Amino acid sequence: MANSELPMMLERARPFLRGAYDEIDPSLPEFITVLRQVGASECWHKHGSFFDHLVDIYRILKLWNAPDSVARCGLFHSAYSNSYVNLAIFQPNVDRQKVRDLIGDAAEELVHMFCIVPRQPLIHEDLLFHFTDEELVSALKESEKSMKEAEAEDLELQKLKIDDQNGNWLDEIHDKYEILKSQFRDKLEGFVLPEWRRKIQKVLPADGVRVKHIKTGEDVQVPRRLVAIFLFMTMADFCDQLFSFQDALFDNSNGRLEFAGNTWTALWPGDGKPGLWMNSISRMGALYTLIVREEKLFQREEGNRKNEDEQNQKRGFEEIELVIPPVFDHCRGVLFPSDQSSARDLYWEAVSMPPGEKTHEKAETLLAKACELNPFIGEPHVVLAQVYNSQGRYDEAEKEAETGLRLMLEWGATWDKRMSWEGWIAWTRVMLMKAKEKSWPHTSWGILNLGLVK
């Protein structure tokens, strides 16, 4: 996404920055009031309160263009407690109708399923851990080729269909259209699935997977589209809450977030470093993209095989659009663990050095390398913009500030969680404004006087 789209992105984020919740969803103020009334703001959650986490997840999902039912599910996603946390602010045996009346049937059904599915083994052990980083990168390339081929065929058929309907050379066009449709059906009969589709269908069949209810042990059928929705939501869930504390808890020194360790003696909040979670989330995004592409191709092929009555048979949650998050270059990139760790360590070294002009020179080198190794996060660009502003290199500062702002608006969450998302956005806008003004204070009081953004 080009930095020229920043004004539009900022406009979409502004209601969240200003707390104008009714502009986002007229019912959102009521939702927030109810969450406060049931005590969500009194519950601890990772790096803040449960209430803050729920609102943050909602913001992320809305900035990712999630459908309303999915965003509302995010706002109430652990309300009955789930496989990760015991935070039942509503009781599923008595409060489901209350929640249904509040957020709608579709959103409540998602919340209910979210809270009974064993999400940790489903997403990680049953899906994510079946793919290496290299396999995901290769599958993304292969799947993009498959999608382009399908789109080209559909475009040719659509052109012929329009000509047929318009009566242009009717007999010739109609015959050619029917021949192409017939060829497409024949192609399907002898079609050999590419490796990436075979792998997706193996780990996640078209009709979904069967799991055990986390509370009753009963079998629960989870449609494939619902698995995709939960993967999408888990990306938002994790990016909001993970930082170095969880790395210490689970011994995530390799950056793969495999939940292998059990260091329960880790002291909260730890050192506050950005966590090593981005490799895992980038893998989730890649896998989600593959599932979305497989769903599109599967539905296309089923539509050409079946009659109208058969096409009307639903597999579950097909009314919910599967949108692609903007992060990781619209989920087309996988961040390797070594690059993730190196970029984090370089950034941390830069921001932890004692202040001084010579320090700035070294910080520039460290931050530039961090941006190169991990091009998906905004904070290193923002700190680098401050370095450039302080040196009077305003054009470079403007470029870095714009890139940092774009990335943080895409995420809707922070990587360096020592400051809030709203705080990072405001500071970045100050960097950008001062770069455009080509001015920067050279006194301590001048730095403290910064703040107003235009």
Image (cartoon, grey):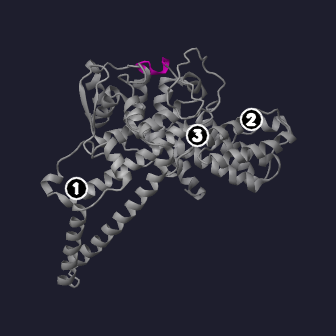
Residue range of the region highlighted in magenta in the rendering: 37-43
Residue 320, given in percent of the width and then of the height, sits at 31, 45
Type of amino acid at the residue the image marks with label 1: Glu
Magenta region includes residue 187: no
The disc label shown at residue 282, or none: none
Which picture quadrant has residue 166? bottom left
Residue 275, given in percent of the width and then of the height, sits at 59, 32
Which picture quadrant has residue 358? top right
Residue under label 2: 349
* Residue farthest along the bottom direction in this orientation: 169
The disc label shown at residue 302, or none: 1
Residue under label 3: 337
Type of amino acid at the residue the image marks with label 2: Glu
The residue located at (58%, 40%) in the rendering is: 337
Crowding at label 3, few (<14), some or many (≥20) Cα neighbours within 10 Å?
A: many
Type of amino acid at the residue the image marks with label 3: Pro
- Front residue of 263/398: it is 263
Reply above or below: 375 against 149: above
In primary-sequence order, the first of circles 1 and 3 is 1
Q: Is residue 221 visible?
A: yes
Which picture quadrant has residue 37? top left
Left or right of 57? Residue 395 is right
Residue 436, given in percent of the width and then of the height, sits at 73, 54
* Residue farthest along the top direction in this orientation: 265
Residue 260, given in percent of the width and then of the height, sits at 50, 25
Secondary structure beneath label 2 = helix
Q: CA gap, disc 1 to disc 3?
A: 38 Å
